[in-house]
Image (cartoon, rainbow, N blue to C red):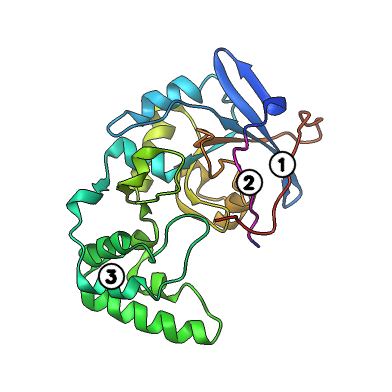
Amino acid sequence: MAIWYEGNRNNEQNRREKDGVVYYIRGLREVNGVRYERYGVKTHFIGRGEDYIEILRQYVLPLYQPGDIVTLGEKVISMCQDNTVEKQNVKLGFWAKFLSKFATSNHSGIGMDEPYKLQLAINMKGLPLVLWGAFWGAVCKVFGKRGVFYEIVGQDVAGIDGFYSHSAFETYHDLAVLNPRDPDKVCAEIQEKLGISCVLVDANDIAVEILAKSPDLAAMEDDTLAETIRDNPAGQDDELTPFILIRDIGDAEAEPFVPLVAIDKPNH
């Protein structure tokens, strides 16, 4: 079930600071009988080509304790890898303009109703596969089944983010961010170099997709990991909290937390 919140989630009453690192209490979530407290770690705006190892060393390592799990927003890792496409380099064609008129609008971001995003999908996967996906997606939608288009064209297309005029960050108005390259390698490198147990996620207010996890978390079910951040504690606005630190607090008392009030649906 989708959960939506209006605006920035960085409530000042939930703000904390340790060793110069700012973070926000994101509340308690119980999964399979385990009580997890979550903390949204505040960073600067992470640009293309930055070193994610050094970023995690600066912002996450001062807060990290053995047993913690850190979720990594896929957009930030892709920005560090500069796995991006500028809008000016996407030449819009007939099929992208035409098919985008029939695509479903996506409240959690930009969907295939954005012609440039659809054109990028065509460039990545080829027109025949996109047409095939669009056809079966339309047929299955009539019978109440959604998401078939992405099942056919692939998760890499589903993971395209950007070209989003509503983004709080101007950078993403004319920039598309693709899925991270070698996600398993990214998580393994972070564990090896920093000792941080981590999960690479594509999360929004509608769904959570586990892209990879560090080797020490191999036995932990993806569904369990996804449930710890099902309410998308990283946020959808300009929070600048791409890393969520998840801590099993056992029977300990949770930090005081002022929750946001969920809304019925987005206003745009």
Q: CA distance from mark 3 to mark 2?
A: 31 Å
4 vs 83: above or below: below
Q: Classify mark 1: residues with Cα within 10 Å, few (<14), some (14-19) or many (20+).
A: some
Mark 1 or mark 2: whose residue is earlier in sequence = 2
Span of residues in magenta: 2-9
What number is the disc on residue 260?
A: 1
Comparing marks 3 and 1, which lies closer to the viewer?
3
What's the residue type where badge 1 is placed? Answer: Leu
Q: Classify mark 3: residues with Cα within 10 Å, few (<14), some (14-19) or many (20+).
A: some
What number is the disc on residue 97?
A: 3
Q: Is disc 1 in contact with disc 2, using a CB cutoff of under 8 Å?
A: yes
Mark 3 or mark 2: whose residue is earlier in sequence = 2
Quadrant in the rendering for residue 20: top right
Mark 3 or mark 1: whose residue is earlier in sequence = 3
- Asked if residue 163 lies in the magenta stretch, the reply is no
**How far across and down, in percent of the image, does residue 258 sit?**
76, 34
What number is the disc on residue 6?
A: 2
Residue at position x 39%, y 66% from top?
113
